[in-house]
Image: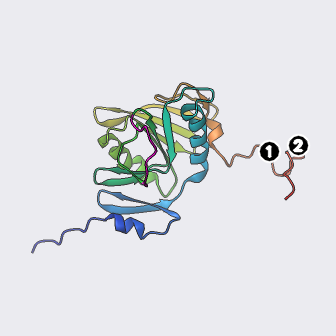
């Protein structure tokens, strides 16, 4: 007896998930996980000022947090992605982006590490995404990969205390430690900590 065909997930399946979850279709299967906001906002802000707005560095890039990438049959949401302006001269009108980015970064967590280290990295290679990053806030590590012969090959690993200067966004290095939003600048009971404004 023939086995029943496995039903492939559709975009309607993604729309049915609650908005507080990131929903993707990977190899026809819906995948969900919580959002990775803190480090994504820090890294996105760092890159946007320098590489999009040109403050202290070159311009020519668009950087987005959580873009919905439609890469053939795969629908993935990268934590961050960047496009050279020559490839994306205008802002997309809807949520769906079919132009593959030049650069992606995934932020690792217990709920995403299986996909981020596995299939999503493979999808990046298949889509021709030239640069891939994996940021692990818990370990304090940023791994840089580049596309070579259709595969993501490790270029370097940046650790706490070091500067980030990985191709292709390497014109203005910045401290990796700046990406960890919950590292306290001051202990909560430090009398030298600046006072919060009255509300």
N-terminal of the pair, mark 1 or mark 2, is: 1
Q: Position of residue 156 (x, y in %)?
A: 47, 30
Image point (45%, 49%), residue name? 78
- SS for callout 1: loop
Disc 2 is placed on an element classified as loop
Viewer-nearest residue: 46 or 164: 46
In the image, taking residue 8 as reference, residue 116 lies left or right, namely right
From the viewer's perspective, tell me whether residue 168 is left or right of residue 150.
right
**Point 87% across, 49% down: residue:** 195
Location of residue 26 (image quadrant): bottom left
Q: Which residue sits at x=33%, y=45%?
A: 122
Image x and y of residue 39, in percent:
59, 47
Report how far apart the C-alphas of labels 1 and 2 lie in the structure.
8 Å
Residue 132 vs residue 63, the one in the foreground: 63
- Return the residue at label 1: 186
Can residue 70 be seen by looking at this rendering?
yes
Name the residue beneath numbered marker 2.
192
Q: Which mark is residue 79?
A: none
Q: Are marks 1 and 2 in contact (CB under 8 Å)?
A: yes
Q: Which residues are magenta?
A: 87-95
């Amino acid at each position: 007896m023939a086995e029943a065909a496995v039903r492939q997930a559709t975009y309607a399946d993604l729309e049915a998930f609650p908005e507080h979850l990131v929903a993707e279709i990977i190899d026809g299967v819906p995948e969900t996980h919580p959002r990775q906001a803190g480090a994504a906002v820090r890294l996105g802000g760092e890159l946007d000022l320098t590489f999009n707005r040109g403050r202290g560095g070159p311009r020519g890039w668009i950087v987005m947090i959580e873009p919905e990438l439609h890469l053939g049959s795969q629908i993935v949401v990268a934590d961050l992605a960047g496009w050279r302006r020559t490839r994306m001269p205008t802002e997309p009108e809807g949520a769906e982006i079919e132009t593959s980015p030049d650069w992606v970064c995934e932020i690792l967590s217990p709920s995403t590490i299986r996909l981020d280290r596995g299939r999503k990295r493979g999808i990046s290679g298949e889509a021709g995404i030239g640069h891939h990053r994996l940021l692990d806030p818990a370990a304090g590590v940023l791994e840089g990969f580049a596309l070579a012969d259709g595969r993501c090959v490790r270029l370097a690993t940046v650790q706490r205390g070091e500067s980030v200067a990985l191709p292709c966004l390497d014109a203005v290095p910045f401290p990796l430690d700046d990406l960890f939003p919950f590292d306290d600048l001051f202990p909560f009971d430090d009398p030298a900590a600046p006072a919060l404004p009255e509300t």
